[in-house]
Image (spheres, helix red, strand yellow):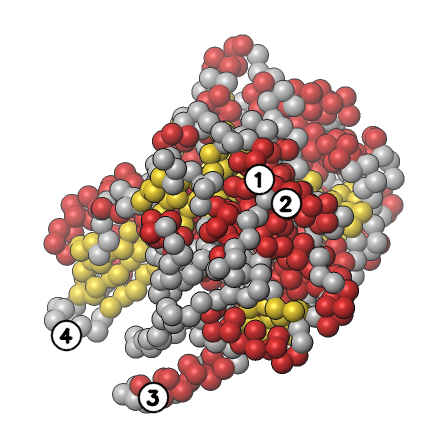
């Protein structure tokens, strides 16, 4: 870590409290009265204290427009030594709790103020929330953003109809142009509604941990919960690079502090709010400081374990528990809530945060090896050594590549006594009901969330979140059911399974829980994070085979030799029956459902879902979705019989199956309404959409369902209630980074080009001034001075730039061609044939 590994905390020591002054003796950050009028609601010399009555009023108003946010129990409570819950404030249209503040602040305006409109300064979340509700309530909104604001934030504010002014290098300079700020009493009262919700959802809570910037959220929550439950602990967490509230508590008054760049950008407040400080100072139990390393670790934990995307500020609370052991020993064995305030992390920053966290944990290392460049065998030797120890290569600076033959044996049939092509088993509604009775004591139902983009799709979209399962995938359901029905003698001996990851993790987790030994056989190309998870869950892991078919063959050999029970994780009837419980939950949670979209690999999930849905609600449509890279199920339905295809790598790796299930195919043939194929670009666009707009971590297979909607393959769903099953979230951080890049490129927001300029500082400054003034982010940059064809005093600059949207990308192309003419060459066009999705539909019914 770059900073000292010691966390700091500040409690309410009586000596410090005694030193506090009622009136601050410092110059306020507000502009001079000769410039603009100081906001009377945020007067540093007459700070206000927000009462419980103010918060109740705000809560009642907010509840008319905004639904209560969910409270999720952590999957890793045992690791933290406490009952840890997350208050999820990311599932809003603009992705943060700021929507509560924005709606309430605008609702409290009088008619004259509504007609005049409002102006504010922000780093992003507050601006987008105010713009969103300004549009909904027909109130003009002007937002002042620092010049360093990400293009995605600027684009959202424009999208919601706000007038955007770029001013200043940081929030302190930008705020000098605005009146409405984070310290307004209505804003603090609205923030307190979160505290009331927490106590209603979890009355036994012992402590609440709150990220702190200017202190409005902390003050509102403290005022609410301390009134209802005085003995509850309220802790604030701030970063070392922006410790304004920590300093205010230390010195007894808000004061100007130096703010440095950090991951938690929305906490970068140079001054604590006067109203916030005045409200919270006697209610706060402790302040804790964390650094960027710990925040990135918390972001990685939430990404990998909870399958949700949060920004740095939201991860600050959890970072306090991940910093050093026992920094908060008084919270051990208590019930604690961390507030996840927002999910608006830039798609460029997220992969960097995850890689940084992996490096801190020692999971990413840098090697430098000297080899003979003309000898490919030397390169092969190095790569073989890395592969043999089970490591992944993230970056490799050689331009040479190695090819592997991953073709499957097309003549090999994978079956056992429970998956016999001559005697297929039909999965029924009763099978799923019986499975639900077995698994319910261990597995609560998974939630669903409503899409924020209903208007764009002209349909009501609901996401069924199988990503929240303990191992991050729906396959836990089948795994638990299959283990529960095993005879006692077979449970004692144990099982063996071949898997690409998700099925194995589910069997490992519940095998450990039920005391059943589990052996997992995985092919050599399995993602390292899934292999490691199986190790962590106590299974014996064998890496054998170049593909899943070979691993299955080896697993059956182990079963014969050791007397273990071989479970075909793709097609065993008990596995499929467990999958059917998803459909039972959907029908109970959303009886109004008109259609269900299901990702399809070997077909087990879609078969089980169709069997249940069609039994209960025959007119409900069930569609399967598969990647066009390996359309095994689609082709099988076309030909009327099970078909094998050569394996190909796919973004949707967990459903890239060269063969399909015997029982699954037999069950689903008469039930499925349509089978859809989606293009890889549209899968990555769906991953990008779910990360940016829904704040959900999904793997490529899960994103296929949304890809069918984005690709306009289901116009018949217009005005219908549609459920997309998000089947899993076990995507590696490296693969996620590549998906986001490809998704941005497919949307025309990532543009690659090169430009030849004079090799002088002034020419470089000119180039970047053009791009900076037009609001483009430079994602990658390379200066090529090698080629002998170039003029000796010129350099070829290769860039990858991010634009806000397609039209913005076209503006970049026009700008470069106007300023540099033929010296600018675009390697990727902002608009091409990829924007018409080459996807396919097969209607399965007559």
Q: CA distance from mark 2 to mark 3?
A: 54 Å
Q: Is residue 387 left or right of residue 210?
A: left
- 13 or 255: nearer the eye? 13
In the rendered view, tell whether residue 509 sits above or below residue 262: below
Circle 3 sits on which residue?
377
Mark before the other along the chain sequence, 3 or 1: 3
Q: Is residue 48 left or right of residue 27?
A: right
Asked if the residue at tag 3 contacts the one at tag 4, i.e. Cβ–Cβ closer than 8 Å, the answer is no
Q: CA distance from mark 1 to mark 4?
A: 67 Å
Asked if the residue at tag 1 contacts the one at tag 2, i.e. Cβ–Cβ closer than 8 Å, the answer is yes
Pinpoint residue 190: horizontal percent, then vertical percent.
Answer: 66, 27
In the rendered view, tell whether residue 637 sits above or below residue 165: below
Residue for point 46% across, 22% down = 135
- 166 or 446: nearer the eye? 446
- 195 or 488: nearer the eye? 488
Q: Quadrant of residue 565?
A: bottom right
Mark before the other along the chain sequence, 2 or 1: 2
Residue for point 61% across, 49% down = 577
Asked if the residue at tag 1 contacts the one at tag 3, i.e. Cβ–Cβ closer than 8 Å, the answer is no
Label 4 Cα crowd, 10 Å radius (few <14 / some 14-19 / many 20+)? few
Pinpoint residue 7: horizontal percent, then vertical percent.
Answer: 71, 60
Circle 2 sits on which residue?
432
1 or 4: mark nearer the eye: 1
Q: Residue 788: which numbered mark, if any?
A: 4
Mark before the other along the chain sequence, 2 or 3: 3
Q: Residue 612: which numbered mark, if any?
A: 1
Q: CA distance from mark 2 to mark 4?
A: 69 Å
Q: CA distance from mark 2 to mark 1?
A: 7 Å
Asked if the residue at tag 4 contacts the one at tag 2, i.e. Cβ–Cβ closer than 8 Å, the answer is no
Residue for point 77% across, 25% down = 51
Residue for point 38% across, 62% down = 644
């Amino acid at each position: 870590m770059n900073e000292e590994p010691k966390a700091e905390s500040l409690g309410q020591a009586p000596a410090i409290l005694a030193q506090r002054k009622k009136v601050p003796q410092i110059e306020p950050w507000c502009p001079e009265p000769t410039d603009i009028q100081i906001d009377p609601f945020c007067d540093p010399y007459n700070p206000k204290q927000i009462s419980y009555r103010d918060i109740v009023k705000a809560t009642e108003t907010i509840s008319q427009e905004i639904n209560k946010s969910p409270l999720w129990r952590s999957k890793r409570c045992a690791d933290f030594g406490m009952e840890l819950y997350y208050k999820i404030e990311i599932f809003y249209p603009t992705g943060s709790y700021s929507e509560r503040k924005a709606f309430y602040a605008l609702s409290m305006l009088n008619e004259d103020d509504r007609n005049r409109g409002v102006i504010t300064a922000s780093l992003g979340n507050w601006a987008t929330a105010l713009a969103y509700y300004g549009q909904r309530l027909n109130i003009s909104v002007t937002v002042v953003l620092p010049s360093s604001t990400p293009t995605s934030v600027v684009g959202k504010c424009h999208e919601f109809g706000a007038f955007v002014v770029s001013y200043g290098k940081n929030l302190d300079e930008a705020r000098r142009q605005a009146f409405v700020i984070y310290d307004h009493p209505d804003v603090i009262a609205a923030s307190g509604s979160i505290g009331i919700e927490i106590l209603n959802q979890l009355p036994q809570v012992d402590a609440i941990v709150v990220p702190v910037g200017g202190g409005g959220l902390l003050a509102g929550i403290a005022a609410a919960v301390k009134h209802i439950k005085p003995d509850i602990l309220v802790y604030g967490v701030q970063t070392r690079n922006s410790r304004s509230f920590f300093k205010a508590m230390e010195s007894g008054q808000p004061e100007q502090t130096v703010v440095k760049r950090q991951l938690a950008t929305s906490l970068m407040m140079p001054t604590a709010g006067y109203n916030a400080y005045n409200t919270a100072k006697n209610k706060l139990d402790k302040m804790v400081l964390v650094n960027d390393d710990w925040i990135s670790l918390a972001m990685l934990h939430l990404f990998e374990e909870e399958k949700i995307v949060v920004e740095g500020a939201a991860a600050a609370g959890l970072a306090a528990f991940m910093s050093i052991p026992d920094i908060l020993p008084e919270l051990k064995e208590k019930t604690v809530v961390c507030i996840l305030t927002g999910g608006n992390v830039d798609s460029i920053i997220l992969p960097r945060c995850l890689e940084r966290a992996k490096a801190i944990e020692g999971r990413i290392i840098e090697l430098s090896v000297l080899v003979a460049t003309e000898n490919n065998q030397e390169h092969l030797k190095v790569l073989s050594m890395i592969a043999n120890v089970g490591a992944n290569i993230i970056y490799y600076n050689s331009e040479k590549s190695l090819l592997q033959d991953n073709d499957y044996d097309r003549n090999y049939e994978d079956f056992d006594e429970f998956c016999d092509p001559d005697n297929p088993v039909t999965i029924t509604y009763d099978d799923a009901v019986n499975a639900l009775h077995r698994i319910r004591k261990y597995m609560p139902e998974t939630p669903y969330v409503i899409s924020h983009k209903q208007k764009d799709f002209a349909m009501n979209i609901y996401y069924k979140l199988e990503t929240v399962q303990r191992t991050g995938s729906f396959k836990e359901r089948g795994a638990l059911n299959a283990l529960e029905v095993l005879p006692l003698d077979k449970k004692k001996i144990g099982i063996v399974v071949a898997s690409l990851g998700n099925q194995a993790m589910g069997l490992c987790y519940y095998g450990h829980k039920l005391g059943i030994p589990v052996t997992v056989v995985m092919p050599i190309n399995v993602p390292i994070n899934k292999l490691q998870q199986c190790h962590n869950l106590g299974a014996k892991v064998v890496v054998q085979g170049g593909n899943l078919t070979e691993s299955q063959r080896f697993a059956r050999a182990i079963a014969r030799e050791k007397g273990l029970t071989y479970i075909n994780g793709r097609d065993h009837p008990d596995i499929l029956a467990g999958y059917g419980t998803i459909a039972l939950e959907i029908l109970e949670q959303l009886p109004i459902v008109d259609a269900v979209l299901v990702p399809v690999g070997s077909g087990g999930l879609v078969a089980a879902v169709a069997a249940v849905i069609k039994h209960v609600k025959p007119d409900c449509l069930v569609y399967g979705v598969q990647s066009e890279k390996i359309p095994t199920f689609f082709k099988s339905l076309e030909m009327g019989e099970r078909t094998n295809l050569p394996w190909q790598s796919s973004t949707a790796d967990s459903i890239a199956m060269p063969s399909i299930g015997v029982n699954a195919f037999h069950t689903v043939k008469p039930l499925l309404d349509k089978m859809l194929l989606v293009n890889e670009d549209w899968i990555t666009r769906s991953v990008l959409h779910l990360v940016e707009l829904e704040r959900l971590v999904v793997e490529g297979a899960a994103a296929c369902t949304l890809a069918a909607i984005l690709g306009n393959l289901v116009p018949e769903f217009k005005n219908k209630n549609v459920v997309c099953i998000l089947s899993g979230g076990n995507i590696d951080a490296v693969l996620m980074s590549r998906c986001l890049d490809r998704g941005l490129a497919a949307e025309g927001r990532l543009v690659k080009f090169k430009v030849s300029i004079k090799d002088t500082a002034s020419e470089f400054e000119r180039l970047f001034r053009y791009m900076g003034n037009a609001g483009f982010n430079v994602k990658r940059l390379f200066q090529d001075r090698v080629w002998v064809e170039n003029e000796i005093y010129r350099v070829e600059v290769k860039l990858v730039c991010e634009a806000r949207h397609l039209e913005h990308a076209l503006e970049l192309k026009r700008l470069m061609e106007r300023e540099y003419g033929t010296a600018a060459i675009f390697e990727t066009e902002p608009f091409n044939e990829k924007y018409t999705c080459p996807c396919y539909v097969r209607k399965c019914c007559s």
